Amino acid sequence: MTGPGSGELEPRATSLFGDEEVALVDLLDRLLAGGVVLAGDVTISLAGVDLVRISLRALIVSIAPVERPGTLAARAERAELESGRG
Amino acid sequence: MAEDDDGGRTRANRIEIDKDAVRRDLMKLVLTIVELLRQLMERQAIRRVEQGDLTEQEEEDLGTSLMHLADAMDELTEEFGLSPEDLNIDLGPLGPLLPRNR
Amino acid sequence: MSDTLTYVYALAHGVDPGEVEGLTGVGGGAVRLLSTDGVAAIVSDVDRAEFQERALEERLEDLEWLTATARAHHHVVDTLGHDHLVAPLALATVYFDDERVRAVLAENRDAFSAVLDQLAGRAEWGLKIYARKGGGGGDAGEAAKPRSGAEYLRARRKALRESETSLDDAREAAMEVDAAVTELAAATRSHRLQDAQLSGQSDPMVLNHAYLLPVERVDELRALVASFADHPKVRVEVTGPWVPYSFAQAAQGAS
């Protein structure tokens, strides 16, 4: 475990940790240009066989109210836009 | 496609349905999806309340429905011996299904 | 056309060809040295079929292959990095053949030399900062059952906002730590927050940075991190020293 207080912070550039102690995620951060991202999909498998992939990104859309001028919501929305949020 | 359990596209999140525990695992799948939708609906309802977009009656009815939904989920997960952890899938860019502090 | 490509692990200064003897890299290939004029490339042969562009894209999706390749790559870089100045390249930097590598070395000799000079006497350290699990904030354990739908919504809203606030607090604290460590560093680089499934961490990550630190400042780093050990909002993890993977982009760019 590489943590503070592990007593292994030696002030020599040449003292490097052995292979086994390096966490894969940390290594991949450094070896791959963009780091590693797991796809936002879910795969359902049965008896060890992948059968269905659900892409949840496509399915989820939040429903915003239709703007009607003068409602509290419409005013709030305008304020949001003006303050550059969202 | 001939991909074994951990080969191939291991980067996708996987819900395994064990053929010997189909009922339990199927429920886990169903409840996971239901819980996702419940959480999303709850968050969206809260947003709508904050935006002042609902009438008092709508707020009350929405709140009561969500409360009953939450109770029903608690009962079902208990019945099938599932914990909040069991229902969680990390969707990467979408973040985990359930927020870590529920 | 040959059935191999030349895989380049890193650029280096002052490595003897003898020192790479017996060292094996990706796919078990024997590691060799290609040098021109002081700047050397650490290379080995790899299967063309495995590393050609389209095949490579698919392999990068395969976590098993990725793990094996990353570890093999790291083994080479880390072994040589012990006693030499090394500027590591990204995973799977391949060239048509040795000739091509030598040509690139010659074309970019000055730029590569400059990168290596920048790294001399410095090592990379990583900071990973996580938000501590809230002190009861956001917990769905309601003391009393809400008596109305509206009350339920209010309670849920409060819980959600509290957990967001605590995440914000953690981010703020993380910025503090980052600012302090940046003072010690010659250069910094930020990495994407790590996927919870890969890292196995349940606390949300709020910062993932790399710092190029002069070796003589390590004690200061240690003291700084220790001072944050009991911070109520964040947990700070240090990794390192690393061969400076995150700071060799200039070397990468020329390829």
Image (spheres, coloured by chain):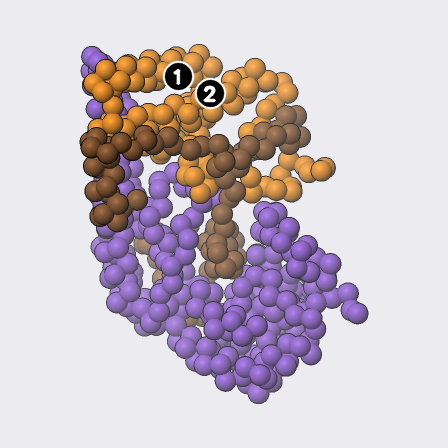
Q: Is residue C224 visible?
A: yes
Residue at the front extreme of this rendering:
A69
Amino acid beneath label 2: Leu
Which residue is labeled 2 in the image? B31
Considering only vertical position in the picture, is C161 above or below C25? Answer: above
Left of A17 or right of it: where is C141? left
Q: Nearer the viewer, residue C186 or C54?
A: C54
Q: Nearer the viewer, residue C137 or A70?
A: A70
- Identify the residue at horizontal 46%, vertical 78% (top origin): C116
Disc ID at residue B73:
1
Q: Which chain is brown?
A: A
User: Subunit of mark 1?
Assistant: B
Residue at the right extreme of this rendering:
C1
Q: Quadrant of residue C153?
A: top left
Chain B colour is: orange
User: Residue C114 appears at what percent x and percent y?
Assistant: 45, 81
**Mark 1 / mark 2, whichever is N-terminal:** 2
Instruction: Determine the CA span between mark 1 and mark 2.
Output: 8 Å
Q: Nearer the viewer, residue A31 or B64?
A: B64
Q: Quadrant of residue C182?
A: bottom left
Chain C colour is: purple
Q: Which quadrant of the figure contains the C terminus of chain C?
A: bottom right
Provide the secondary structure element on which disc 1 rests.
helix
- Identify the residue at horizontal 55%, vertical 39% (top origin): B12
